Image (cartoon, rainbow, N blue to C red):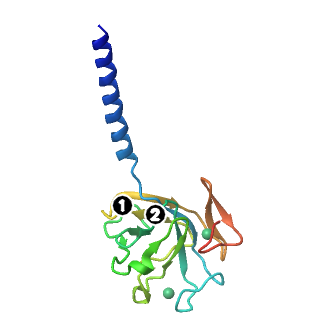
């Protein structure tokens, strides 16, 4: 009788272990988030070519460096041809824990690996960050009409307008 009791406990433990392993697999995420963007940039920040182009800020909220080379971004849901960040510029495309990276939405692909093949519409659209398979969504945000030099940033779980944008720094 006691042996059976121990056996059942053991089975329960095994089942719990299997359940927990499955759950952690389902929850596996890339610890990247879209943290801020500016769709109408007039005077806030210029790129490496002195151009006030639209920008997106990503944060690595994990505890390890993440190379965003090989990940995809798009301004459309279900984009069959999203833009892949080049994966041969590790030093430029790696974000350290709790740090940020600025991606330029300017279609100036000859200006470096942090320049994307789309611009942001001030009338509103979406920003989608995709995993290396080009289809799994890591993060996304759809926005409405924007104003010049006022960014939108994520504070906690909320997206808010930011009169004082903070590209490359915490919101
Ligand atoms: Ca540019
Ligand atoms: Ca920021």
Tell me where residue 75 appears, x and y as whole percent. 44, 68
Task: Tell me the quadrant of the picture where the C terminus can be found.
Answer: bottom right
Which secondary structure lies at badge 1?
A: loop
Instruction: Please tell me which residue lies in front, 10 or 43.
Output: 10
Tell me where residue 162 appears, x and y as whole percent. 68, 67
Q: Residues within 10 Å of mark 1 (few under 14, many from 20)?
A: few
Q: Residue furthest top?
A: 1
Task: Tell me the quadrant of the picture where the N terminus can be found.
Answer: top left
Q: Which residue is mark 2?
A: 64
Rendered residue at 54%/86% (across/down): 47
> CA separation, marks 2 and 1?
29 Å
Can residue 124 be seen here? The reply is yes
Q: Are marks 2 and 1 in contact (CB under 8 Å)?
A: no
Q: Nearer the viewer, mark 2 or mark 1?
A: 2
Rendered residue at 55%/83% (across/down): 53
Please tell me which of labels 2 and 1 falls first in the chain.
Answer: 2
Tell me where residue 37 appears, x and y as whole percent. 57, 70
Which secondary structure lies at badge 2?
A: loop
Where 2 falls versus 90 (above or below)? above
Q: Residue furthest front?
A: 2
Instruction: Please tell me which residue lies in front, 121 or 68.
Output: 68
Q: Which residue is mark 1?
A: 78
Q: Is mark 2 within 8 Å of ligand 2?
A: no
Tell me where residue 132 appears, x and y as whole percent. 33, 65
Q: Quadrant of residue 71?
A: bottom left
Q: Residue furthest right?
A: 163
Rendered residue at 65%/76% (across/down): 148
Can residue 116 be seen here? The reply is no
Q: Residues within 10 Å of mark 2 (few under 14, many from 20)?
A: few
- Left/right placement of residue 14 relative to residue 123 reads left
């Amino acid at each position: 009788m006691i042996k059976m009791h121990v056996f059942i406990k053991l089975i329960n433990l095994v089942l719990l272990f299997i359940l927990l392993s499955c759950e952690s697999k389902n929850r596996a995420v890339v610890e990247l988030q879209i943290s801020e963007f500016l769709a109408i940039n007039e005077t806030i920040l210029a790129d490496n070519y002195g151009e006030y182009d639209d920008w997106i800020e990503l944060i690595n909220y994990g505890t390890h460096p993440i190379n965003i080379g090989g990940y995809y971004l798009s301004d459309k849901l279900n984009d069959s041809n999203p833009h892949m960040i080049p994966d041969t510029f590790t030093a430029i495309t790696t974000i350290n824990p709790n740090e940020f990276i600025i991606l330029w939405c300017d279609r100036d692909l000859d200006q470096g690996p942090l320049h994307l093949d789309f611009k942001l519409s001030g009338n509103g659209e979406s920003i989608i960050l995709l995993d290396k398979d080009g289809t799994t969504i890591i993060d996304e945000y759809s926005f409405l009409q924007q104003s010049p030099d006022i960014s939108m940033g994520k504070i906690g779980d909320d997206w808010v307008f930011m009169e004082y944008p903070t590209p490359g720094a915490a919101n």
